[in-house]
Amino acid sequence: MLILGLESTCDETACAVVKDGTTILSNIVASQVNLHQIFGGVVPELACRRHIETILPVISEALSTASVNLNEIDLFAVAKGPGLIGALLIGLNVAKGLSLATEKPFIGVNHIEAHLYAALMSQTTAIQFPCIGAVLSGGHTTLVKMENIGIYSLIGETVDDAIGEAFDKTAKLLGLPYPGGPYIEELASRGDPDRFSFKAGRVKGKPYHFSFSGLKTGVLYAIKGQDGRQEKLLDDQDKRDLAASFQETAFGDVTEKIIKAAKEYECRSIVLGGGVTANQKLRTLVTEAALGLTVHWPSFKLSMDNAAMIAGLGYHQFLLQGKGDPLDLEALSGLEMSYAR
Ligand code: KG4
Ligand code: ZN
């Protein structure tokens, strides 16, 4: 079965052709980072306009790279949420149009669930379910118990900033470009993680929930003083140490909760996904702490927003549903993961 996946939730316009949910024939991502960088974050209106201009050329490139004709596609899969509503509508309506024109089904998938699937799609060995799933991205910090693909129960989530957002805000405070994650990682690799003592938040009565807003305020105080006004003069080494201390605190918290959850929920494996999992330091910390557990990571390209994960998950969802979605399917900017009861 050939699936064409579309992703337009935020600032990447992406299209991929995937065979049977696992074999990636093409995976084209047109990033809008340069467009938004001068504003220090994603500007929704500009993102939508760029998606409109880019989506058809990206689809053509994905088809030609895969050496596949549009008429050979069996299923169109598209991210229906969560994300920027205007951006979502473009991918969703293009998928509906392709489905109508070719008389093939289309299916809407959840972008967060697809981030978890990204680590599984290249697996050659069987996955040991149940496992702990951790989505660490610019919009989400979510821990789930995963009974199988499509069957999750919520263990914990952030009550304020997502972890990637905390990286982006810290980077902004340090005068680094958007998105800040890779810049923080690079600075931190040359810094002392013990220099500043920051704390990740705890949520009363919810041991697996996350809170990163206090950590972000800690960084602000370290840079601008307690009143947030006084511009402290940080030299280059101070900045490296600050980035390293921030990163260590955020990842220490995430690692501890993932490992604790794996024990409490009797899971033998861990699946991670989302842009923050591109970070090598995170990979080292989790892998070192996960003694006796199997850890599944996405490849670098699949950790960032992409359409291969959308096509891959769309395949499984289509098999489970036994049919495609109706043409009146709506995009949902605040779509949550669906949890089993
Ligand atoms: O999954 P993603 O591409 O988009 C969302 O669905 O949000 O994640 C983007 C986030 C951004 O916040 C970015 O700063 C972060 O992933 N990120 C990183 C790294 N690369 C990207 N965070 C830490 N270290 C990195 N190397
Ligand atoms: Zn994402």
Image (spheres, grey):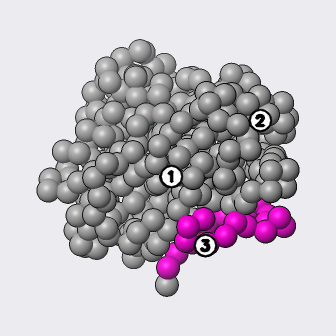
Residue 303 position in % (x across, y down): 47, 40
Foreground: disc 1 or disc 2: 1
How packed mark 2 is, by other alpha carbons closer than 10 Å (few <14, some 14-19, many 20 or more), is many
User: Regarding mark 3 in the picture, which secondary structure is present there?
Assistant: helix
Instruction: Judge whether 192 appears above or below 236 on screen.
Output: below
Q: Amino acid at mark 1?
A: Gly
> Where does label 1 land, which residue?
21
User: Regarding mark 2 in the picture, which secondary structure is present there?
Assistant: helix
> Where does label 3 land, which residue?
321
User: Regarding mark 1 in the picture, which secondary structure is present there?
Assistant: loop
Taking depth in this image into account, of 2 and 169 the one nearest to the observer is 2
Is residue 29 rendered magenta in the image? no
> Where does label 2 land, which residue?
55
Taking depth in this image into account, of 201 and 139 the one nearest to the observer is 139
Residue 9 position in % (x across, y down): 69, 47
Taking depth in this image into account, of 261 and 233 the one nearest to the observer is 261
CB under 8 Å between discs 1 and 2: no
Residue at horizontal 67%, vertical 70%?
A: 323
Residue at horizontal 46%, vertical 54%?
A: 116
